[in-house]
Amino acid sequence: MFSIDKWKNGEKWTNWAGNVISYPSEMYLPRSIEEVTNIVKHARELGKTIRVTGAAHSFSAVAMPEHIALSLHNMRGLIAVNEEKQEVTLWSGTYLYEIGPLLAKHGFALINMGN
């Protein structure tokens, strides 16, 4: 997984395999929807693009940040459970490996899980 603690603005960003490399000028780790909104406004004012980096496990450049890297690492976890509908709402930064244990606490599981 991409090391959030070691990343600084302007330094090298790479996926886990090392075959996708970028040097985004800005990196953000928001903790709220309001912070994400402000980052999007900031990018729009500057005419820059934003990429959500996720866990950096993709072999393709789909998540490669050209201008602004946005990690939702601080926006993870379970938001709501609707047992009647068998639905859950998760924060978008929740990693795939975290979902199973969160669901199990409510007697749920994923039918299939990507990697």
Image (cartoon, grey):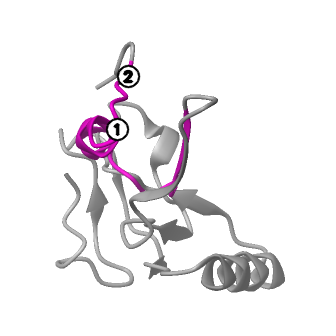
Q: Relative to 45, does residue 20 appear above or below in the rendering?
A: above
Residue 102 is one of the magenta-drawn residues: yes
Q: Position of residue 74 (x, y in %)?
A: 38, 73
Q: Relative to 80, does residue 35 appear above or below in the rendering?
A: below
Q: How many marks?
A: 2
- Asked which quadrant contains residue 47, the reply is bottom right
Residue appearing at x 48%, y 79% in the figure: 25
Tell me the number on the disc at residue 110.
2
Which mark's residue is nearer the viewer, 2 or 1?
A: 1
Q: Amino acid at mark 1?
A: Leu
Q: Amino acid at mark 2?
A: Leu
Residue 52 is one of the magenta-drawn residues: no
Q: Dot 1: what SS?
A: helix
Q: Relative to 103, does residue 95 appear above or below in the rendering?
A: below
**10 Å crowding of disc 2: few (<14), some (14-19), many (20+):** few
Residue highlighted by disc 1: 103
Residue appearing at x 19%, y 78% in the figure: 5
The residue closer to the viewer here, 10 or 74, is 74
**From this viewpoint, which residue is outermost toward the top?**
111
Q: Are marks 2 and 1 in contact (CB under 8 Å)?
A: yes
The residue closer to the viewer here, 10 or 85, is 85
Tell me the number on the disc at residue 27.
none
* Screen quadrant of the C terminus: top left
Q: Which residues are magenta?
A: 87-110
Q: Position of residue 15 (x, y in %)?
A: 27, 47
Q: Dot 2: what SS?
A: loop
Residue appearing at x 56%, y 58% in the figure: 51
* Sequence-first disc among 2 and 1: 1
Q: CA distance from mark 2 to mark 1?
A: 8 Å
Residue appearing at x 45%, y 50% in the figure: 64
